[in-house]
Image (tube, grey):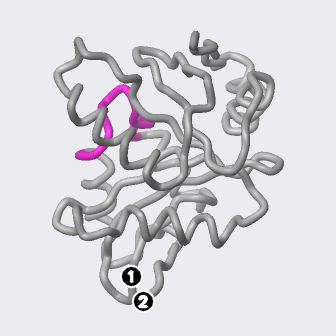
Amino acid sequence: MSIKFSPLSKHDINYLNVIELYKEAFTTVRRLPSWLLRLMLRKGKDGFSILYENDNWIGLIYLTQYKDTVFVHFFAIAEFQRSSGYGSKVLHALKEMYPQYRVVLNIEEIDAQQENYSQRIKRKSFYLTNGFSSSGYIVKEPGERLEMLIQGGSISKEEIEGIYKNLFGGILGFLYRPKIITINK
């Protein structure tokens, strides 16, 4: 059984399920504004994929590439499919799809003061178990501090800035620059 990354289309039978999963899995702060998401999907934004194993819908993922890096913006497994090993299977499939690339993603910073502290610990543990490690950087986005994890090497502050500039493009990329903070070890 293999994982399939199917480009998200409003014609897909699971389109509405994917949109609901997106809203459920990501905080309001992390989500793209609905109008921007709809615009990106209408234009066939590369990287938004519905995840399937055979014909079974299992989740969603949004990826972008920059040089030799794949940035996982959003990754969620459908609630009824969780704890079945699909998260690990997807990450393994991703590594097979991009064997020469570093894979990076952001998770909520570990903060004992937050209500979902135990969920944050569990999430980080999942990624560490699946071959990721801390990049050594916190990405401070509007309203949220995120730890960047990496698989397949290391990354510099300048490369992280390049990823975000590439993601948002010209003017928006210039205006929206998250602050990159080195983690003190």
In the drawing, does residue 21 fall left or right of residue 61? left
Give the residue type at disc 2. Met
- Mark 1 and 2 residues: CB-CB less than 8 Å, in contact? yes
Q: What element carries label 2?
A: loop
Image coordinates of residue 176 in percent, x first then y, are 63, 19
Say if residue 51 shows up in the picture. yes
Closer to us: 148 or 26:
148
Q: In this view, does 126 lie above or below 133?
A: below
Give the residue type at disc 1. Glu
Disc 2 crowd rating (10 Å Cα; few below 14, some 14-19, many 20+) is few
As for residue 52 lying within the magenta part, the answer is: no
Disc 1 crowd rating (10 Å Cα; few below 14, some 14-19, many 20+) is some
Image coordinates of residue 49 in percent, x first then y, are 50, 65
Residue annotated with mark 1? 53
Q: Is mark 1 on a helix, strand or loop?
A: strand
The magenta segment? 24-34
